[in-house]
Amino acid sequence: MFVVGALAVTAAAHTFVASDQQRIDTLQSQLTQTLAEQQDLQLSRAELESPVRVLAIAERQLGMISPESVSYLPPADPGPSVSQAGADAARAALSAAAARKAGPPKSAKSAKTDALGARKRTRTSPAGARSSAITPPTG
Amino acid sequence: MRRRLLAMLVIAALALSGLAVRLVQIQGVDAVHYAAYGSQEVYQRVALPALRGAIYDRNGNLIAASSPRVDVVADDYLVAGSKTGLGRLASILGLTVPALRAKLSEHDGYVPLAYQVSGAVEQEVASLDLPYLTFAPDLARTDPDGNLFSPVLGIVGFAGQGLSGLEYLENSLLAGSAGSEVVPTGPNGEGLPGSATDVVAAHQGTSLVLSLDEPLQFEVTKDLSQQIKATHATGGVVIVEDRRTGGILAMVDLVVGPHGVVVPSGQNLAVTSVYQPGSVMKLVTISGALQSGLISPSSVFTVPYQISLGGWPFSDADYHATEQLSATQILAQSSNIGTIEIAHLLGPDRLSYFLRDLGFGQPTGLGWPGETDGLVPSPNDPATWSPSSMGTVPIGTGEAVTPLQILDAYNMVADDGELVAPRLVEATISAKGVEHVLPVQQERRALSTKTVSELLPMLEKVTEDGTALAARIPGYTVAGKTGTAQIPSATGPGYQPGAWSATFVGFAPAQNPALTTIVMLSHPDLIYGGLASAPVFSAIMRYALRHFDTAPTGGQGLSAGSSAVGGL
């Protein structure tokens, strides 16, 4: 009787162990699948963000065209460094606030003139570069 | 009756004896064999694939990654007469029914029907419940940017092994190691609940963080592609390098494909292919003479239009009367004769020494698979050195080098005379997510700071009023050098008629360099480096300097400007 009882308990315990193991296997399988989905989603995001894809959509689907040339507007006189220029700008702003009643600051006028002058110089620069940019062949 | 009984007894005894012998054989003599056979039926060793490490650019953008996939495999012996569901299966796998029937008639027992299918396709196929189909684990390698980085990244084979490029170079890190375990299985092969035994854990691959910058790589590809089309070149190479660390920020190799489409090269030409670079090599002669104290930037030379050396005529590009040129003017105007005169002051041995000192004729330190040392003649080797070598070597037509070697030599000047090895991998990320930043490789001093301080204004002069006005960048000072050389014949001695390579290499800002860039075009119809390649350099650097927040320095180009790439 005792032996039969022990065997029944062992069988029941084994059933529980097998059941839990099955649950663990299922969860591990789900974990693997979820990790794979995560990897796929990361790849999809990277593909969606790719500049190659964005450009293709812009040009082929939205009819956009890339500019033939890109213009950059550098500061008229960056000074010894950007931080220095920033400090100067901050000082100018403080001065402007203090002297607001006295009319527009002279520094603002001169900055505008410099910027315009810079744009004028731009138009002459590339032509000069092309006319004299000759490299002697070697060999 | 008695005899019959006896006979039956003997027969029964013999039968029982046979059973007893068989029992002893199975349970005793062959017990191990049959136990193993039984285990094979129940237990199966299952592979635990290691996920290959991902590759990121310097900003954390994913540029290559693996994802788990399965291969759909059929046991065609199990197909038998039942061929229901073939039409649906063919449709899911993108096959025609006749093609699928042919595959299922191979009598092989293991017929892969489709490789690396996604989880969704796997579920669709599994829902057909076809008993002869199984799914084998596999990994797919994907480059989200398409072929934007392909010459650098290389190829990963079906077995998940890197076959070329960075995937091959760093395969030991990226691949990790596959594991396995033994699990109990049912009659249909499905796993039974129970503890796995003999587990060999899989080690996931290490991920890499590269110095490459995805937005810059895209811009460089766009600019170079435009100029290849505009100049009808057959291909081109651009490398952008971080002056301080030697980190390669962009590496683009483009060629014109069979249908006239500009496509990435099949290999990393910047490292694996050599060419005659032309006047960019004048840096070696000039810097060597400065370093040796033989000249100063203001040293004046009498420069005729043409001289003869070793029985061969050498001349400048354009005819001129004999004139007095300073060393600075010789470099700025790229005078062949003036450079050869300086090389004669230096002599063959010192010229050869400085070629090696600046990194030519030896690996760059990148360790790239298939990287070439280049072909640099030596006066100690008569097979490579001839009487005319003192004319050809100083002007860059007596040696063959890679674009990366040239870039590194100029980056050395930008880095105050220190030669730093280029690199692509900046950090590794373990499977547990721990990032390990790799140290910058040891620098080697090639030129003194005094030599560099003399050389910098000379190189700056090249873009101020020399041969590379088109390399100027509004708001920044630029130093660099042009190179134009004929392309040797592939079939014999001499050159290909009308075939030239055009190079510009330089750095900016000139006085405090941040970036060094080389642009090389092969077979452009605008043959000069100053006309074909310098505008590409300018366009790329305009973007790159702002992209990396490099403060403008003012200088000769201090004005708003527009890129001239493709618009010459």
Image (cartoon, coloured by chain):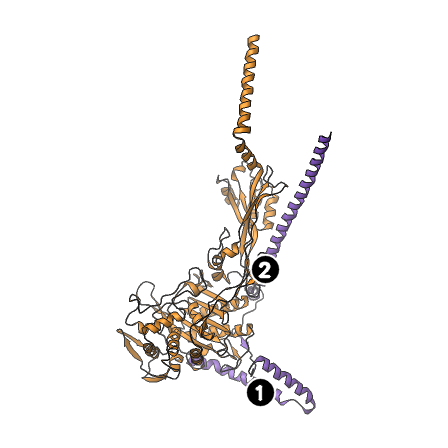
For chain B, give the colour: orange
Where is mark 2, residue-wise?
A: B434
Q: Quadrant of residue B346?
A: bottom left
Q: Quadrant of residue B317?
A: bottom left
Please identify the residue farthest to the left as the structure is shown.
B311
**Could you tell me the amino acid type at mark 1?**
Thr
Query: Which SS class for mark 1?
Result: helix
Where is mark 1, residue-wise?
A: A113
**Could you tell me the amino acid type at mark 2?**
Val
* Residue B64 shows in this picture: no
In which quadrant of the rendered image does the C terminus of chain B lie?
Answer: bottom left
Query: How many residues crowd mark 2 within 10 Å: few (<14), some (14–19), many (20+)?
Result: few
Please identify the residue farthest to the top as the structure is shown.
B1
Query: Residue B333's mark?
Result: none
Provide residue B452's location: percent of width, then percent of height. 44, 78
For chain A, give the colour: purple
